[in-house]
Image: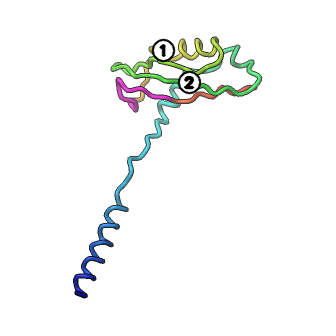
Amino acid sequence: MKKVLILSAFALVMNFGVLSAKEAKPKKNHAAMKQEISNLLTPFQEIEELEEDVTVKVKVMMTPKHQIVVLKTNASDEGMDTYIKESLNYKMLESADLQAGEDYVFTVTFRAE
């Protein structure tokens, strides 16, 4: 009986060790992609005249040719929405971080000066 108790305790400890050693999927940083999008969204005159910071959520999809297609933004200003779409739509990305056919959502913050 004592051996059964010791073996079951040992098995329980080993199972816990295996379960705790499982690695979660690491999140990708996409640093190269962020830098490319940041370069594409260099501010124009109307954005430079912002009175306060504006954060916009942008939903994009990647084409098989690594081009960005803007699906939607939550910009409250029509000019900001148009600027984002014109700056990003069908622009090629050199980084291959994103998969074709997948939707991605990211935030863009335009800082007031």
Report which quarter residue 4 is drawn in.
bottom left
Left or right of residue 35: residue 8: left
Q: Main secondary structure of the magenta part?
A: loop
Q: Which mark is residue 39?
A: 2
Residues drawn in magenta: 96-105
How is the structure coloured here?
rainbow
Disc 2 residue type?
Answer: Asn
Residue 11 in picture, x, y percent from top left: 27, 73
> Looking at this view, is 74 or 98 the one in front?
74
Horizontal arrangement in the rendering, residue 79 relative to residue 86 (left or right):
right
Q: Nearer the viewer, mark 1 or mark 2?
A: 1
- What is the quadrant of the C terminus in the image? top right
Is residue 17 located in the magenta-colored stretch of the structure?
A: no
Q: Position of residue 95 (x, y in %)?
A: 42, 29
Q: Secondary structure at mark 2?
A: helix
Residue indicated by mark 1: 89
Question: What secondary structure is marked by label 1?
Answer: loop
- Mark 2 nearby-residue class (10 Å; few <14, some 14–19, many ≥20): few
Q: Is residue 106 above or below residue 46?
A: below
